[in-house]
């Protein structure tokens, strides 16, 4: 396995160990997933008797999880040799003397004085691996036979003496496999592994995921297909990381563009609002200036008409007023009331020929005498009595209108 591929595969946090078995001609699968947790590992999923690869893929629910596969189907020759062969070829001949190396895969586990050897035909492995490929499952390492349970014996209870694997039973002594027996009994025992409980039938699948986590140098059969799966897995993850990096780059670029857009857009909106406010102030200034000029012109006309006349009229009225009368209101040039609704924009108009006088008198005779004295003034055109009535105290309350002569 190439170093980069190996580094990528073994850098994963979780591994799926799968045992492929065969019963009455049908394949089925056991699954155990181990996940790294600081200085320990935890079983996050275990499943027995999975009927198909489609079901297996659905249960895994992760196309990128590396699979370590143990093949334990019919057709495998498993032997325990009471010596250690000098070579792998010698191990194959010891189990199957007439075998051609090109037709078989074989593996061996070495103990102190024994070798555990498993042999299987290449075409059986290749057919099985193609089925995994067709199902979209990434098998990155393959092991043959039940002897790989040897790797997890140190973490099983020390009193373990027998483990049922498929239709075979492994005989254990001193945490080593010493014998293999044909036995079709169902696996029933539960084993404590750390804080987890594992069924006896899942121990080989557990051994696969355990090897993946603890033995990065462990190599299964050297099949071209497996090596290609490793390469494909590497490039798939590389593509995945590259895609994530590209997406991250584009997302960051879009985010920066968005933030810049929001920043400058906010500035633009602020400037637009400021311009609008300034324009509103300018419009208000123009409007006020127009009102000021209009009112100034109006007042100017009125003041020009009689800036000193108003004082003159008031003095004349006061001079003619007897002590028996008291004035309560004097309106010089009253405002002309316009009909209908008037806005603030319409300037008021004043009647420059009218004076309104209100007050009270001790008797009507005094009021009438005063009116006659007013009629004698050279600037009075006419006098109209608007109202007269006596209050409860006997005083006369009057209101009269003085019309001025045109000059």
Image (cartoon, rainbow, N blue to C red):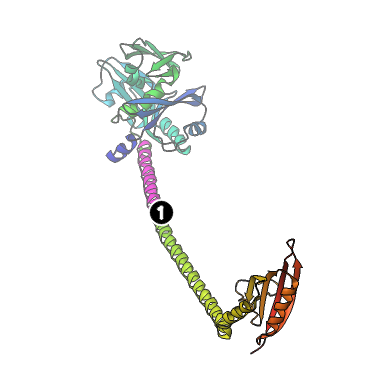
Residue 75, compared with residue 161, is above or below; it is below
Q: Residue 177 placed where, x, y %?
A: 33, 15
Whether residue 19 appears in magenta in the rendering, the answer is no
Residue toward you, 91 or 348: 348
Image point (38%, 52%), residue name: 252
Write the residue at 50% across / 69% down.
280
Q: In this figure, which residue is indicated by the disc labeled 1?
A: 255
**What secondary structure do most residues of the magenta stretch adopt?**
helix
Question: As rendered, which of 359 and 343 lies closer to the eye?
Answer: 359
Residue 100 seen in this snapshot: no
Q: Is 360 placed left or right of 1 in the picture? A: right
Q: Residues within 10 Å of mark 1 (few under 14, many from 20)?
A: few
- Residue 229 colored magenta? yes
The residue most toward the left is 86
- Rendered-image quadrant of the N terminus: top left
Q: Position of residue 248 (x, y in %)?
A: 38, 49
In the rendered picture of this protein, how many numbered marks are placed on residues?
1
At x 43% / y 58%, what residue is drawn?
Answer: 262
**For the point 70% across and 83% down, which residue is it?**
375
Start and end of the magenta stretch? 226-251
Quarter where residue 366 is shown: bottom right
Element on which disc 1 rests: helix
Q: Is residue 53 above or below residue 310?
A: above
Q: Residue 34: image x %, image y %?
A: 39, 27
Q: Position of residue 18 (x, y in %)?
A: 42, 27
Q: Is residue 294 above or below residue 199?
A: below
Residue 314: name its quadrant: bottom right
Instruction: Name the quadrant of the C terminus.
Output: bottom right
- Position of 25 with respect to 398 (left or right) is left
């Amino acid at each position: 396995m190439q170093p980069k591929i190996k580094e990528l595969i073994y850098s994963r946090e979780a591994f799926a160990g799968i045992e492929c078995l065969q019963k009455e001609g049908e394949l089925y699968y056991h699954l155990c997933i181990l996940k790294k947790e600081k200085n320990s590992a935890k079983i996050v999923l275990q499943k027995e008797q999975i009927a198909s690869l489609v079901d297996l893929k659905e249960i895994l629910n992760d196309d990128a999880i590396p699979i370590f596969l143990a093949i334990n189907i019919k057709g495998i020759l498993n032997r325990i040799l009471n010596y250690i062969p000098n070579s792998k070829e010698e191990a194959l001949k010891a189990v199957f003397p007439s075998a051609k190396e090109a037709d078989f895969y074989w593996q061996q586990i070495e103990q102190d004085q024994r070798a555990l050897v498993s042999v299987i035909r290449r075409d059986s492995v290749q057919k099985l691996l193609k089925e995994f490929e067709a199902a979209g499952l990434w098998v990155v390492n393959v092991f043959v036979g039940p002897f790989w349970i040897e790797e997890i014996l140190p973490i099983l209870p020390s009193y373990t003496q027998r483990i049922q694997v498929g239709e075979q039973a492994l005989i254990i002594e001193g945490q080593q496999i010493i014998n293999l027996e044909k036995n079709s009994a169902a696996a029933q025992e539960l084993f404590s592994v750390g804080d987890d409980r594992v069924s006896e039938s899942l121990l080989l699948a557990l051994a696969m995921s355990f090897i993946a986590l603890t033995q990065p140098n462990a190599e299964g059969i050297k099949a071209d297909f497996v090596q290609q799966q490793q390469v494909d897995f590497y490039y798939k993850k590389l593509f995945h990381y590259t895609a994530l990096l590209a997406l991250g780059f584009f997302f960051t670029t879009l985010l920066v563009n968005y933030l810049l857009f929001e920043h400058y857009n906010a500035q633009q909106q602020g400037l637009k609002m400021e311009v609008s406010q300034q324009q509103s102030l300018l419009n208000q200034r123009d409007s006020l200036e127009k009102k000021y000029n209009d009112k100034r012109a109006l007042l100017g006309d009125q003041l020009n008409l009689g800036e000193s006349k108003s004082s003159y009229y008031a003095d004349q009225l006061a001079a003619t007023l007897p002590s028996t009368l008291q004035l309560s209101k004097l309106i010089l040039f009253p405002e002309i009331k316009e009909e209908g609704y008037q806005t603030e924009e319409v300037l008021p108009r004043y009647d420059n020929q009218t004076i309104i006088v209100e007050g009270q008198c001790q008797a009507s005779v005094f009021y009438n005498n005063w009116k006659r004295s007013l009629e004698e003034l050279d600037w009075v055109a006419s006098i109209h009595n608007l109202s007269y009535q006596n209050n409860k105290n006997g005083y006369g309350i009057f209101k009269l209108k003085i019309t001025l002569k045109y000059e």
